[in-house]
Amino acid sequence: MQNARLQEEQVTARRAGVLGMGFVDTSQIQKQLFKDVLSTPELKQLRVVPLTADDHNIHFGITTTTAQQTLNKLRSRFTDQRLTFSIISETGFKEYMLLYDPPKTVEYEDISITEPAAKAETGSIIDHVSQTLEQVRPDDMLAYLVQQAYELKASDIHLENQKDNVRVRYRVDGVLHPVAYISHQKYRLLSSSLASAANVSTQEEQPQTGHISRSYKMATGEEVVINLRVETVPTVYGMDAVMRLFNMRLELLRLENLGLSRQESAVVNEVIQHPTGMVLIVGPTGSGKTTTLYSLINTLNTPERKIITLEDPVEYNMPGVVQIPVTGELEGHDFAERLRAVLRLDPDVVMVGEIRDQDTARTALQGALTGHLVMSTFHAGSAAAALTRMLDMVGINPLFANAMHLVMAQRLVRRLDDKTKQAYQPDENLKSQLKAVIDSLPPHVQKPNLDGLTLYKSGKSSENPFGFSGQLALREQLQMTHGVQQLLRQPPNQITTEMLQAQAVQDGMRTMLHDGALKAIAGLTTIEEVYRVVG
């Protein structure tokens, strides 16, 4: 840096000699401010700075880009003083401007999420955060938003273009909360910084997927680790972006941390110890499928097993696992070819990030039948719906029932805060709804007594205005019982989701609605949360 500055001063001195003007090396002088000579906006506009000034003399520093007519204007303006002009370097001029107009110190206050009903307080918090974002550098904006999202345990950051501004929202415990509004001009800087880091284009007319994994030092000196999956889509008013935060530590990806019941744990442990077969984790976006899948892989990750994954993108780096990133462009037949190549590498366990098409479904099924344990995620509303969709993909295959071992569907609901939750007695209408759910439990499951039933609703406190703390999963585990296998051997056009679910319940499966009702009765969540998520 010192050599570059010295070189700039030497080049500027030579330029001044060519122009026949004096030169001042501002890096070698004590800088003084003369604020009564010209206003700061005038200094910036005219590109001059007073180096010395008294009642009779003013010595101006000018740059090589200062206009000649500016010098004439200054002479006609300061007729009572003798003016002299010397050329200074561009860096020297910028240093003077920083002294005349120092950058404002930005206070990075913590973002807080408040109850929507408290409009005045919520508005002031959003206004404050919005003002903070308008003042900082684009890279600092991204680091600040990510840092605060981690603090609030948010899963996603949404950047949404609107007509007059861009809305910033966090998804916390499955619910979106607005935290700021920024101008379109500021958002253009943020989106450029985001696109550069995620290797996506701000001009692309198609949806894009990117990934950011790096450490960034903010202007405050604080270091923020950014690990995001970035999804962008063009909208009427600009490029919207959703950033999914990956903040799970590898040591937390264990089966015991998934909140499985004793019965659910026994089913999972029994299935994943099999050397072959297919395991599907089913649910909508944001239901914790990836966390569950990685926890299974982490549990199976021993020196005796070879595990290979195909992921888009690789979300958690796992030592001892061969992880292969695939691009979103690799679809259909090409992805199936990549999977077939992986199966030829003699793996014990194969994880496919998501089964999206017919070729991949058939190839994964073949792998499960030929000596591999295949795990994947799948988008479906329930475990039974996932099975019927898979049947549609693979067609008539008498070995399908042999290949499938477990389909586990899940959704996330908000967990009640034990410190603030409030007990209440449900009315007869709600009790009758719950009774219908409880009566439909599998035959062997012990049914809770609904006489004198107590349910819970969320309370609130200054520390927790919503009354919820974290999330818990509602699950259903569809195993390949004898009854389910018999159904799957019928022609696919004769099998319905309702038939499969009814048979699975008869054979012992608790549906997500069953699981949610039991957890609401146990005071872990509200019945409204269960209906909101499961329906």
Image: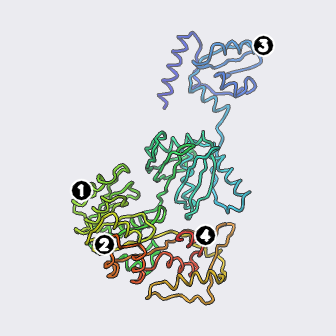
Q: Residue at horizontal 36%, vertical 77%?
A: 479
Give the SS element for disc 2. loop
Which residue sits furthest front?
494
According to the picture, the residue beneath numbered tag 4 turns out to be 468
Nearer the camera: disc 4 or disc 1: 1
**Counting residues from the N terminus, which is met first, the one under dot 4 or under dot 1?**
1
Tell which circle, 2 or 4, labels the residue nearer the N-terminal end. Answer: 4
Q: Which dot, 2 or 3, sits closer to the camera? A: 2
Please report contact status of discs 2 and 3: CB closer than 8 Å, yes or no.
Answer: no
User: Which is nearer the eye, 394 or 300?
Assistant: 394
Helix, strand or loop under label 1: helix
Q: Nearer the viewer, residue 181 or 27?
A: 181
Residue ID for mark 2: 491
- Mark in the foreground, 1 or 2: 2
Where's residue 43, x and y in %? 68, 25
Mark 1 vs mark 2, CA separation in Å = 31 Å
- Which amino acid, mark 1? Ala
The residue at which mark 1 appears reads as: 341
**Proximity of marks 1 and 3: CB atoms separated by less than 8 Å:** no
| Residue drawn at x 60%, y 70% as measured from the top left | 468
**What residue sits right under mark 3 in the picture?**
80
Task: Tell me which numbered mark, 1 or 3, is placed earlier along the sequence.
Answer: 3
Q: For marks 4 and 1, give the CA distance.
A: 46 Å
